[in-house]
Amino acid sequence: MKFNKQDVVEALKTITAPGGGENLIDSKAVSNIMVFGDEIDIDVRLTNPSLQARKKLEVTLLEVIHQKVHPKAKIKINTKVDKPQQPAPIKGKAIPGIDSIIAISSGKGGVGKSTVTANLAVTLAQMGCKVGVLDADIYGPSIPTMFDIEGQRPLSVNVDGKSKMAPIENYGVKILSIGFFTQPDQAVIWRGPMAAKALNQMIFDADWGTLDFLLIDLPPGTGDIHLSIVQSLPLNGAVVVSTPQNVALADAKKGIAMFQQDNIQVPVLGIVENMAYFTPEELPDNKYYIFGKQGAEHLAQDKNVPFLGALPLVQSVREAADLGRPAALQQGTPVQQSIVELTQNLVTQLLKRNTNLPPTKAVAITNMVGCAAIK
């Protein structure tokens, strides 16, 4: 079995590149060809074709090489999709007065997504930003507990002749949650359409006022609520929270993949590693990597998304959440410093993302007055 790279090149010149009149070689769609004996390794770069078109091209490549080069050649095709450089379309309906909307998600429950959301919100508020939190975790709302506002009920206010909900405010953060409308021991047993309707009311029938940031605490996993959010709102980006162990990282990958789907295309601003290590109070300089070391950081590298930072597993963070006083309020502690660094990294990535979009109200955050996060 004798053939060389040039034989493969000549065969590929007979195949037209998707979306153009040129062949695969002249269009530069083939970035690399390697021949090892009877094995052929081909790297193909395409500009965001449909899955059907991509599969069709791969089948054509196999058929042509087997016909024109050798019928028993072993072929490996590595297809990479280069997405167009123009900004992704803004979906949904923007909320007047809100500059940036960021979804905080996790692949699985119990990784501290709501804790991260609460501490990001408080830190942004301490920096002088106007911040809101929408607790979209319909089936397990925990934001009211973390902000010490359990049992409160939003009041109705008149805005331009329309009755709207006034969010509950604490620590400088405006908050709405389904937890305000249910009893603590009451299970929310709703199908998708009912949950979506409740969310839309909290989003569009609320008097959010002027906000620099609206953080949306999503339910764990990927499902109806996530689809409702990305269809309803022009999200500026998403943050994925995970712990370091493999079982959490496997689900975090699915969360990243959901936001990166062609029909969603919400930029992943970064990954947060929660419970990265345990530091006992009596040994503040010791770090014990109970759930594994730097798992989420490695995932960020593998997926080519930013790593925003790591938060430790310490007793004070759990106690602060249970008492309704987020750890970000504990000035000068190592945990608070880690949260500040995480928040600054998030805003940096958001600003980078927004420079690639038209300066519309939905994405412009550079006009924030007094918000030290961007300074």
Image (spheres, grey):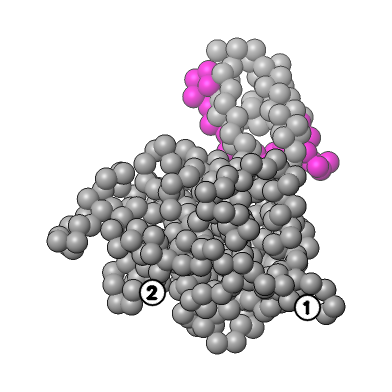
Q: Is residue 287 left or right of residue 246?
A: left
- Tell whether label 2 touches label 1 (CB within 8 Å): no
Identify the mark at residue 77; answer none if there is no mark.
none
Q: Amino acid at mark 2?
A: Leu
Please identify, in this view, whether the residue under mark 1 or under mark 2 is nearer the observer: 1
Query: Which image quarter: residue 206?
Result: bottom right
Q: Which residues are magenta?
A: 15-39
Q: Is residue 51 magenta?
A: no
Question: Residue 24: percent from the left, percent from the top?
Answer: 72, 37
Query: Which image quarter: residue 233?
Result: bottom right
For image coordinates 30% across by 47% down, the residue present is: 293
Identify the mark at residue 158; answer none if there is no mark.
1
Toward the bottom, the furthest residue is 370
**Is residue 175 or residue 272 the one in the foreground?**
175
Q: Earlier in the sequence, mark 1 or mark 2?
A: 1
Majority SS type along the magenta span: loop
- Whether residue 143 is visible, yes or no, is yes
Toward the left, the furthest residue is 282
- Which quadrant does the N terminus fall into? top right
For image coordinates 72% across by 50% down, the residue present is: 196
Give the structural element (helix, strand or loop) at label 2.
Answer: helix
- Whether residue 90 is visible, yes or no, is no
For image coordinates 48% across by 76% down, the residue present is: 171
Q: Is residue 343 left or right of residue 333?
A: right
Q: Amino acid at mark 1?
A: Asn
Disc 2 target residue: 329
Residue 323 lies, with reference to residue 243, above or below; the image says below
Q: What crowding class fits label 1: few (fewer than 14 Cα within 10 Å), some (14-19), or many (20 or more)?
A: few
